[in-house]
Image (tube, grey):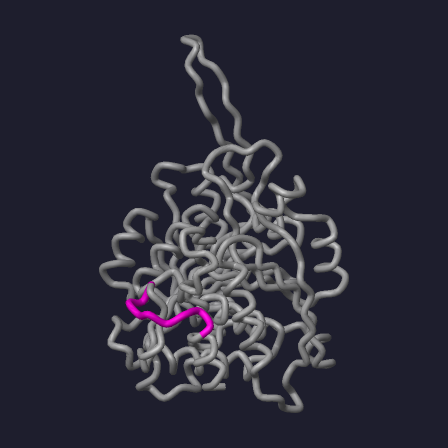
Amino acid sequence: MASLLRRGFATAAQSNKVTIGLIPADGIGREVIPAARQVLESLPKTESSPRFEFIHLDAGFEHFQKHGVALPEETLARLRGECQGALFGAVSSPSHKVAGYSSPIVALRKHLDLYANVRPVASVAGSGQKQLDMLIIRENTECLYIKQERIETDANGQKVAYADRKISEFASRRAGQMAFNMALMRDKLRSTLPESERLWKGKPKVTIVHKSNVLSITDGLWRETVRGVKENNPTAYAGVDMDEQLVDSMVYRMFREPEAFDVVVAPNLYGDIISDGAAALVGSLGLVPSANVGDHFVVGEPVHGSAPDIAGQQKANPVAAIRSAGLLLEHMGYAADAARIYKAVDGVLREGQIKTPDLGGKSTTQEVTDAICNRL
């Protein structure tokens, strides 16, 4: 996988000591986060490599059921005071309302100001898949996910549910700036590769996703603000093309011609749906990583859910969590170590002999993890 995040925390990179909070949370999170830790600990030791320390932290719906809180204050305090980054496993948020419960990952994004969710979706060169190298930037703090909902009763005694949607110029601009900056960064990284290894061969491009033909105020503000990032900085982003897609046509085109997209930036809800759907293009949700990114902290998080139907059975694919650990390292300035992880993962996937059931194999979580570690 191409190197994607190199924003880097200078203090961590200078000292080489990296403290990572491990938050397995629910379901298969308790299997894939230990797998990611094993891979991090298996990295070759060099003078520039990080020295890891790990802190186990609690969160999740199961923790809420036992203790009445999904995201303990102690977890937040230790993340802020002791950790340079974190890995989050998965959460079993119920589909029905549970009094007092709120998603811990949504709360983490809010409390740590992790304003962008960065999700690379790329095929493995030589794997026979349709070639794509797409990066989805999802605004992470607003839209319908502010969770301001209410139920009222109309004049006929029928219940009516409402949900407020928030789109601000401030949050939209931050997401847009990250999208254009990442487009430039990806282009610079691609320039170091042989032409034959570049899956995207054109100018860098940012595609803005919206539905402003219907939601003219909220999506209209999103569209205008993100467009303004380039239009108000013509010199800085002269080398980046810009286009737009209505969210419904975006889904259609993404499945028909995914190779048409480089960097895609979307409001929270659209970005969530698009990025989960994009996982089908590379075979499984179990392959797709993400990073929740702020200016001072990052949390790696596999895109998949808690999968309670296979939890504890060693059937979970650890690749998304392992790649998320790579994104975490890359963000902290350890691009070479992240690249080693990506290369090892791609090698196992390309070989195709050791794979979990979601990819049509019979290998266990531990067997896949061991195969990746052996390649390191």
Q: Which residues are magenta?
A: 358-366
Above or below residue 273? Residue 284 is below
The extreme bottom residue here reads 47
| Rendered residue at 26%/72% (across/down) | 129
Coordinates of residue 216 in the picture (x, y in percent)? 41, 37
Instruction: Classify residue 246 as left or right of residue 186.
Output: left
| Rendered residue at 58%/63% (across/down) | 87
Coordinates of residue 348 in the picture (x, y in percent)? 38, 80
Front residue of 217 and 364: 364
Q: Say which quarter of the image contains residue 95.
A: top left
The extreme left residue here reads 256
Image quarter hosting the N terminus: bottom left
Coordinates of residue 149 in the picture (x, y in percent)? 53, 30
- The reply to whether residue 96 is in sight is yes
Instruction: Classify residue 296 as left or right of residue 325.
Output: right
The answer to if 363 sits in the magenta stretch is yes
Front residue of 322 and 202: 322
Coordinates of residue 347 in the picture (x, y in percent)? 38, 82
Front residue of 73 and 150: 73
Above or below residue 64? Residue 154 is above
| Rendered residue at 36%/73% (across/down) | 203
The extreme front residue here reads 313
| Rendered residue at 25%/71% (across/down) | 130
- Number of numbered callouts drawn: 0
Front residue of 17 and 134: 17
The answer to if 285 sits in the magenta stretch is no
Above or below residue 371? Residue 154 is above
